[in-house]
Amino acid sequence: MSEENERLREQVAKQESMVSSIQDGNKFLQEQTRVLTQEVREAKKEAVRLEAERKAAATKLEAQLLENRKLSRDNQLMTAKKGQAEQILRVEDKGSQSEELARSLVAVCKVVEEVLGRNGYSVRVSMKTDQRAVYV
C-alpha cells in the first residue's frame, strides 16, 4: 500500500506540474492574444486615419486642379486680350510722313503724351480703354 501511495503521489506531482505548465502556457497565449488584439485595434485606427488623410489629400488635389484649370483659362483669356491690344497703329508726324507700328497701346499712349508735351500741346482730357485712346 505504501508503494502504491508513493506511486500515486508521484503521479499527482507529475500531474500538478503538468497542470501548472499548461496554466503557464495558457497565460502566455492569453497575453499574446491580448497584445495581438491591441495591435489589430491600433492598425485599424491607423488605417482609418490614413484613409481620412488620403481623402483630404484627394479633395485638396481636386481643388488645386480646378484652380489650375481656372488660372489656365484666365491666362488664355489674358493672352487673347493682349493680342487684341497690340494692334497696328498709324502714327503721323508733321510733314505728312506716317508709319505703322505694332506696339502695345500703353506704350503708344505714353509716347503720344510725351510728343504732345514736347511740341507745346497740353492734354486737357484723355480717355484710355484697352483698345483706344482719345486726347483733347
Image (cartoon, rainbow, N blue to C red):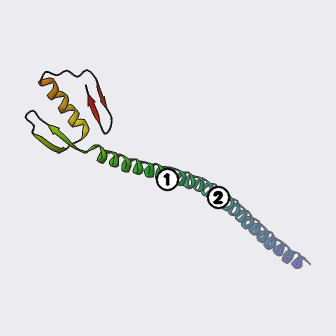
In the rendered structure, find residue 44 and report the number of the disc placed on it: 2
> In terms of depth relative to the viewer, which is nearer, 20 or 55?
55
Q: How many marks?
A: 2
Residue at image x 13%, y 21%?
120
Outermost residue toward the left? 95
Q: Are dots 2 and 1 in contact, CB under 8 Å? A: no
> In terms of depth relative to the viewer, which is nearer, 86 or 126?
126
Residue at image x 21%, y 36%?
107
In percent of width and height, residue 74 lies at 40, 47
* Mark 1, other Cα within 10 Å: few <14 / some 14–19 / many ≥20: few
For disc 1, the marked residue is 61
Q: Quadrant of residue 39?
A: bottom right
In percent of width and height, residue 80 lies at 34, 49
* Residue 51 appears left or right of 117: right
Q: Quadrant of the C terminus?
A: top left
Outermost residue toward the right? 1
Residue at image x 84%, y 77%?
7
* Residue 30 appears left or right of 82: right
Q: Amino acid at mark 2?
A: Lys
Q: Quadrant of the N terminus?
A: bottom right
> In terms of depth relative to the viewer, which is nearer, 64 or 14?
64
> In terms of depth relative to the viewer, which is nearer, 78 or 43?
78
Q: Amino acid at mark 1?
A: Leu
* Mark positioned earlier in the residue sequence (2 or 1): 2
The secondary element bearing badge 2 is classed as: helix
In percent of width and height, residue 99 lies at 13, 43
Residue at image x 16%, y 44%?
100
Image: 7 above or below 94: below
* Residue 111 appears left or right of 33: left
Image: 97 above or below 28: above
The secondary element bearing badge 1 is classed as: helix
